[in-house]
Amino acid sequence: LDFDYAPQSVLISQDGTSKRSFMNVTQEGKSAIDDLREKKLINGLKLSTEDFQPVTAYQISSLGIEFLRQVPNKVKLDVDNYIHGPKPFHEKLLQVALRRAPGEDDVIEQHFYLTAEGGYERRSTITEVEDVSYVSSPFLPLSVRKSEKPTTSNAHRAGEAATGESNIKDELSEAIHLAHVSLLVGEWIPFGSNQIVALNERLGAMDRCQGGLFTSKIDNDPTGTQFKVPPGLTEVNILDYDLIGCINFEAEINYPEDEGIVQVENFGMHLNVDGTIMCGLKIEAIMERKADDISLDMLSRLLVDVQKDSSQIMNDLLSAYQRSLLSMIFNGDQNQRCKYNMVIAEAIDPKLGAEEYMDRGDNENELKQVIGDIQGVHDIGADDVLVLGRDGLLFAGPNSRRHETLLLFYLSLLVRDMFIRVFFVRTFVLDDLLKKIRKLIVEHEKDPNNIPIVRALLNTASRDIILLQEILSYLFESLQQMDVPDRPEDEAGGTLLKGP
């Protein structure tokens, strides 16, 4: 089967701990599994992991076994060869094993291995995300700006993407193309007036020479004459700010890339006192594709790069207190936290009616690569289409820019919703820890060594409860600061505000 694949953020659970990783997932393959379930050829069992993450297990049904008896032997042989090891392990069934190990900057790396009895082993490439060459310019909607200072344009450098390479191994079959694409990658992080003031001061927003190169590394020897940092710093250029309200700036990424990969990464960043964080960029070119011909297959790979690099940028800018809040709420997996992708395009090809994109085929599968499982598709006026997904949305059409205020309001709600879902699961993890502590206290006479363990776990639980309460106060305060936009005068804007 020649299925397309694209990177997707996936939660992987092992030994009671779930961590996110980008994996090459085929939406066509997932659709095929859904087809088999609809035909009652396989059963789906819903369950949860030790840390309360949902999981679906699959089992062949009685009807599926009957169907397999009709499958030609050649097809069965091909499948057998695929799931068994090479010679001399061809009689041994391959097993899948997940291994975690510290990588750069002590970030836990996850890799899958295919093993067979007798010593055969090879690492799977499912977690190896492919890179593409691209050129981007900073983008921030006018509604979040505090001045008319223009952002940098890299349109004149679009040709550099064509000179670069990619390490895509798949032969892409493209169904949907977008024109003049702007991306907004959003998340919610606990912020307040004090954090915004401190960030403005740290970035030098009020200085004569604003911005500069930044890193989260601590200078343990401030009187020394040398300070070593790894290659790959972020250069910040301040656009405008409100001392206690927000800050807008451009961030130029200088992280090292694989040989041959050319990436001109220039983001627009908006950090708001209510915790809404937006990373915006305009796509000038991806590989040989210019701004008027962007494929969703390549866009999905670019988005992975944006999500990773924006996390690194925020890590350099956040205070130690904010990093501790994120570390607690994401169980130490804050560098791989999930974000919301908003894709705004001036045109989509092919331009179809809303329902025609839900074809359970190529169109729907390609959209899933960028915004996750599709929750709804709607016509907004005669020329625009809105596609809502689990992890993002696509708004395409000649009038898409006119509705930026409503889209940003929706984005700010959705990023809070994503954070609250993580918060909710974290309370279950805390509850499980308290039950474990209670059991150790009840059984303390069986093992006296439980007493120091109980004390340590109680300290951890107390700290987590305090931080959770503080995060709740940040969430409550941010919701109080929200203002619902006025109803647009045009019919399409009114439909968008009302909700399909």
Image: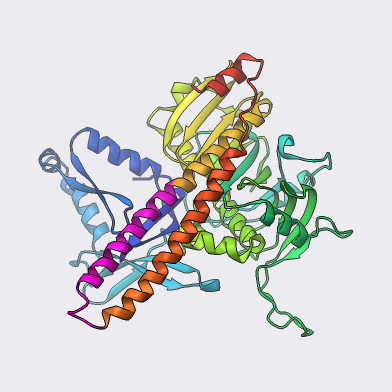
Residue 442 percent coordinates (x, y): 21, 70
Residue at the limit of the structure toward the bottom, as seen here: 224
- Total marks in image: 0
- The residue at the point 46 percent across, 32 percent down is 363
Which stretch did the figure color magenta? 421-448
Quarter of the rendering containing residue 448: bottom left
Residue 483 lies, with reference to residue 276, above or below; the image says above
| Nearer to us in this view, 295 or 493 | 493
- What is the magenta segment's predominant secondary structure? helix
Residue 190 lies, with reference to residue 359, above or below; the image says below
Residue 374 percent coordinates (x, y): 43, 34
- Would you say residue 439 sits in the magenta stretch? yes
- The residue at the point 37 percent across, 41 percent down is 28
Quarter of the rendering containing residue 394: top right
Residue 317 lies, with reference to residue 396, above or below; the image says below
The answer to whether any part of residue 331 appears in the image is: no
Quarter of the rendering containing residue 450: bottom left
- Would you say residue 4 sits in the magenta stretch? no
- The residue at the point 22 percent across, 47 percent down is 58
377 lies left or right of 270: left
71 lies left or right of 15: left
Residue 125 percent coordinates (x, y): 42, 61
Residue at the limit of the structure toward the right, as seen here: 208
